[in-house]
Amino acid sequence: EDFTNYGDLAPILGQVNTVLWGLGTSSLLVDDATYTRIHVDFPVAFLTAWLAARTEAPMAFHYVTGMGTDPDGSERWAREKGRAELGLAAMAAGSGLRTFAYRSGYVRPRAEQANPAHHLLEILLKPGGVAISSEDLGKAMLEISARTGELANGTVIDNVDSIAFARAYRPGAG
């Protein structure tokens, strides 16, 4: 699919105030150009269309980048995702949109999609604060969206903070 063209969605985007962006792939599965297209070009295109369609704040864009993301890192994937984090925050500056980058180490799929290996990996990584379930990560994102005055545009959220925000989440609050 073409995740760079959102023209048909403009009427819907004008009504949306929070986006949870988790589209991505492993750098081991695609070439460098495809990786950049997925992790930089796709979210930039989306944010461009969203900012053109909606101008009423507050707005929040939550971008799952992953532990190890670093615009100055030694690995290309880390630099590309770091570049995306910085670029998205720069695009949002002054617009009423806040961008948040989530640097979790391991996100376990929902129970319906998870297999025993997913659950085992979560059990092994949880004591180090590295693992979070996809449901809890979503709760953290919604909790952060509701706290419109607390976190600035471009804030990086590590996994321990995601876990804390997920615990604080109350549906319908804020």
Image (spheres, rainbow, N blue to C red):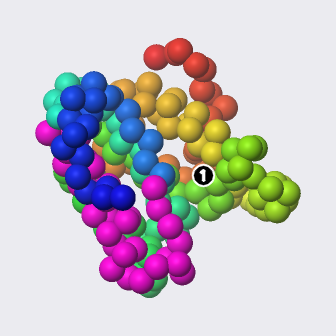
Query: Label 1 belongs to which residue?
Result: 159
- The quadrant the N terminus occupies is bottom left
Q: Is residue 43 above or below residue 173?
A: below
- Residue at horizontal 44%, vertical 42%? 20
Q: Is residue 137 magenta?
A: no
| Residue 92 in sight here | no
Q: Is residue 8 above or below residue 2?
A: above
Is 166 on the left-hand or right-hand side of 115? Answer: left
For the record, the magenta segment spans 23-52
Which of the 4 image quadrants contains residue 140?
Answer: top right
- Residue at horizontal 33%, vertical 49%? 154
User: In the rendered picture of this protein, how many numbered marks are placed on residues?
Assistant: 1
Residue 139: where, in percent of width, then height?
Answer: 58, 33
Residue 171: where, in percent of width, then height?
Answer: 58, 19
Who is closer to the viewer here, 81 or 113? Answer: 113
- Residue at horizontal 43%, vertical 48%? 21
Label 1 crowd (10 A; few <14 / some 14-19 / many >=20): many
Q: Is residue 74 above or below residue 67?
A: below
Is 131 on the left-hand or right-hand side of 81? Answer: right
- Residue at horizontal 16%, vertical 30%? 55
| Residue 14 in sight here | yes
- The secondary structure type at the circle numbered 1 is helix
Amino acid carrying mark 1 in the image: Asn
Which of the 4 image quadrants contains residue 56?
Answer: top left
* Predominant secondary structure, magenta span: helix
Residue 111: where, in percent of width, then height?
Answer: 75, 44
Q: Is residue 38 magenta?
A: yes
Who is closer to the viewer here, 49 or 101? Answer: 49
